Amino acid sequence: MVTAYGSAEAAAKAVTAVAGSVPDPEIPNLTVADLGILRAVRVDEAGHVEIDLTPTYSGCPAVEAIESDVRHALVLAGWPDATVRRVLAPAWTTDWITAEGRRKLAEVGIAPPGSACAGSGASPSGPIGARAAVPVVLVSCPHCGSRDTELVSRFSSTACKALRRCRSCAEPFDHFKPL
């Protein structure tokens, strides 16, 4: 398959496009690439494909479905022997969600997360110190844009989202929690 692309590097770009276009089963308008969970693609000169995926959190119920969907997409694209690996380090952070992914979240009424590391002194790939203060979360309503929102529940339709309500338009909405 590498010869069809001219080089392993060109083949890796094609594999990245296929794997990155797989939709998230919980939020189908987002792709694996939008979420930033596609961590690495390797294609060697013999055409062996290896994909690294980092789940949004280690207990994510969708991770097996995503891995299966990526494998299936690669088989359909002509890469039947691709290996999909689950990589837990460095841990995924919401800072890895792309700008397009954040736009798509808001488009379906889910408030995108703020920066997971803002004000904590941590980097997206480093640990958060034990003394890090819990930041005040200012969340804009994805329906009307008001920042006058309140937390209703720390958990929503999935563990990675919280339920909030807008005090201006009174609409409830999911908020993708910064991790």
Image: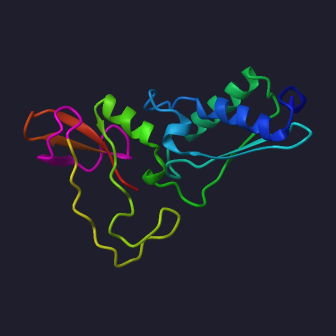
Task: Answer left or right for 22 relative to 107.
Answer: right
Q: Position of residue 156 (x, y in %)?
A: 30, 41
Inspect the magenta stretch and tell me whether residue 158 lies in it: yes
Q: Position of residue 45 (x, y in %)?
A: 90, 41
Q: Position of residue 167 (x, y in %)?
A: 8, 41
What's the residue at 46%, 32% (across, down)?
A: 30
What's the residue at 44%, 37% (across, down)?
A: 100
Task: Answer left or right for 119 relative to 71.
Answer: left
Q: Where is residue 70 in the image (x, y as percent from the top left)?
A: 65, 32
Task: Answer left or right for 18 relative to 32.
Answer: right
Q: Is residue 160 above or below residue 29?
A: below
What's the residue at 60%, 38% (across, down)?
A: 64
Instruction: Provide the residue span drawn in magenta.
Output: 141-161
Q: Quadrant of residue 49?
A: top right
Q: Which secondary structure dominates the residues rendered in magenta?
A: loop
Residue 116 visible from this viewpoint: yes
